[in-house]
Image (cartoon, helix red, strand yellow):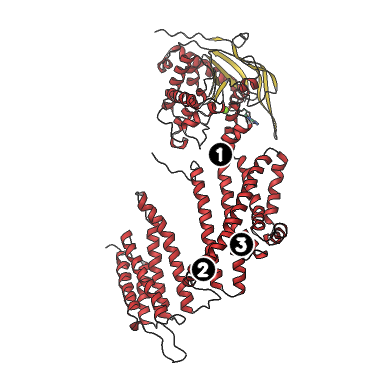
Amino acid sequence: MTLKAVVNNVAQMPASADAVVDIQKLSLTFQTADGPVYALSDVDLTIERGDFVSFIGPSGCGKTTLLRVIADLEKATGGDISINGVSPQEARENRAYGYVFQAPALLPWRSIERNVTLPLEIMEIPREERIKRGHEALKLVELNGFEKKFPWQLSGGMQQRASIARALSFDADLLLMDEPFGALDEIVRDHLNEQLLKLWARTNKTVAFVTHSIPEAVYLSTKIVVMSPRPGRIIDVIKTDFPKDRGLDIRETPEFLEVAHRVREGLRAGHSYDE
Amino acid sequence: MTKIKLDKFCLVAAIAALLALIFPLTGIDPDSGKQIAFVSDIPGIAVAMALSVITGAAFTWLGVGRIQYAAIILAVAVFGCWQAVGALYNHGIAGHAATGFWLFILSLWAFVWRGIDVVARYRSLETAKQQSANILVPIAFGIWLLFLWEVIVAGFGVPQVLLPAPSAIGLRFISSTDILAADFHQTFIKAVISGYVIGCGSAFIVAIAVDRVPFLKRGLLPLGNMVSALPIIGVAPIMVMWFGFDWQSKAAVIVIMTFFPMLVNTVTGLNAAGALEKDLMATYASGYWSTLFRLRLPAAMPFVFNALKINSTLALIGAIVAEFFGTPIVGMGFRISTEVGRMNVDMVWAEIALAALAGTAFYGAVAYVERKATSWHPSFRVRRH
Ligand SMILES: Nc1ncnc2c1ncn2[C@@H]1O[C@H](COP(=O)(O)OP(=O)(O)O)[C@@H](O)[C@H]1O
Ligand SMILES: [Mg+2]
């Protein structure tokens, strides 16, 4: 098997017609009591259908904020953004995306099954259909059998998997994930990375994934967005070309290490003219 | 050589019981100038005292490490209590108890204290055993307090008007069940229940409405505190003027008392849902009512139940006090105010006992529903695999 990573800079490439997320000159400034916080500035980015895009950067560089702007949980203060050709608010109202937060955010009074089917319930999908789809989503994250348990009866990793199942349950084409595996140990994380990659390869979803782990970013992505803080901006976009059915073992290949090196260089450069 | 650890409580019990055998049991009868009774005249209490000396001495050495030992000393204490009460009433000690008698009570106190302490520390993996131990502790302690009350009132001959003995209250309670039932029906079933339901229910609905108006939300807390501080003795006569003498005016007082605790708690509870959960609902484009029923009301439940519990106590107090300001000739508050005037203090106490029972049962029922409804809350959940 030959692995060939084609690495090229795509930051200046024009927006494609099949863009799921199209961001131009986006900026966001939080007005706080201590003066303005420039969370994002001059961000240009295109996410195409089927892309797996990772956002990497030191903490506080605006990764969460960028994802929240895409999800319409935060309003940009400048620039343009469209999701599937419409405004983020319309996209949210169309239930265009599933969002996985950094914390599981399961409702403690609902069983795992009822947590996973919560979005379906809000979308007024009939009960039988809900249960069927909830079941399938739980199977995807290997939590079948835990339907009747309550969140506090599950470990942290299982809770996070349940929250992923919840985001998958209504089958949105776009998945927004904010450091979903940040709090988990290395082994569980590797396993979930593998599962996530398989899911992406099978369903052809578009994924925007925030992380601060370089190997995780390189392993998962078709496109790595390197960010730097204050103000949060994109300093490099790295496109990789690993096969879709890659296994964890590609992390030992020279191509992988080469991409990882470039990501690290980008992060270092971002830091140097900050301090 | 291992150091022997003496059980201090059993030691006290043994010594006190020994001294009780020596010191005079009663005072001098002012008419005859003789002692009223001797330990030797009353075989029951003599046996109980001797048994206490032996048991106390034995467990001073053995220690009360096991639940079985605790059962033995509690059994000895129960026998002692029974004999002490018998001596008080059957041998004329009532009103004339002296050092010997009180030393024996001290001995019993030491046994009961030690015994309950051991039961309270009892830990078993078997749920049934653990639960019986958990229930036994407050019951045993309650019975012991009633016993102390009884012997102190009888032993010192406290006048009935000042404080009747629990037995007198109990007898009065049993012989007046029809009056008590009528009073309970008037005060609790009619006034308390309706006032509580109207007060809590309307406050809950108003809270949901207020929640949508930001300035009301902020202005409410100080206003709520002000209304809560209104003295019911000022409000009650006005309500009687407005709504008449019957239960409606009492229910109105209860509505005023329970409204604001419920309103303030529900408004607070509606804001208890975290920002993360609200964002989650937003990502599903969940509407106002959907988020209210699926997120905010469930998250508010611990606060709502808190208010329901506070209000269950307030409602009963409110109804009883309000009846002091005019009522038909029935009701718990009415009975208390008239029987005090007639010096029928045992009837007053019977009503107090009824109020305590009703209040505890009411609170317990609300707490039970809370446990069922919010079993997900960290304060209730039990880890089961
Ligand atoms: N609601 C907010 N109000 C004010 N400042 C905020 C808010 N949210 C985020 N920030 C600030 O914006 C910057 C970017 O935050 P964030 O997007 O959470 O970073 P990251 O996810 O990359 O760690 C940080 O400096 C943070 O303190
Ligand atoms: Mg973040």
Look at the image and tell me whether residue B314 can be seen: no
Left or right of A109? Residue A34 is right
- Distance from the alpha carbon under mark 2 to that under mark 3: 19 Å
Residue B256 vertical placement versus A52 (above, below) = below
Return the x and y of residue A239 as percentages of the image width and height: 53, 12
Left or right of residue B150, residue B335 in this image: right
**Residue B118: percent from left, percent from top:** 37, 60
What element does badge 1 sit on? helix
Chain under disc 2: B
Q: Which residue is mark 3?
A: B320
Tag 1 and tag 2 share a subunit: yes
Query: Of callouts 2 and 3, which one flags the residue occurring earlier in the amino acid sequence?
Result: 2
Q: Nearer the viewer, residue B40 or A175?
A: B40
Secondary structure, mark 3, is helix
Which of these two is toward me, B64 or A234? B64
**For the residue marked with disc 1, what is the amino acid?**
Pro
The residue wearing badge 1 is: B298
Q: Residues within 10 Å of mark 1 (few under 14, many from 20)?
A: many
Would residue B245 be found to the left or right of residue B98 on screen?
Answer: right
Q: On the rendered structure, is A112 left or right of B277?
A: left
Which quadrant of the view contains residue B49?
bottom left
Q: Amino acid at mark 3?
A: Ile
Q: Position of residue B290 (x, y in %)?
A: 60, 32
Q: Is mark 2 within 8 Å of ligand 1?
A: no
Q: Earlier in the sequence, mark 1 or mark 2?
A: 2
Give the x, y percent position of residue A51: 53, 14
Badge 2: how crowded within 10 Å, few (<14), some, or many (20+)? few
Asked where in the image residue B286 lies, by quadrant, the reply is top right
Circles 2 and 3: CB distance less than 8 Å? no
Number of the front mark, 3 or 1? 3
* Residue B176, numbered circle: 2
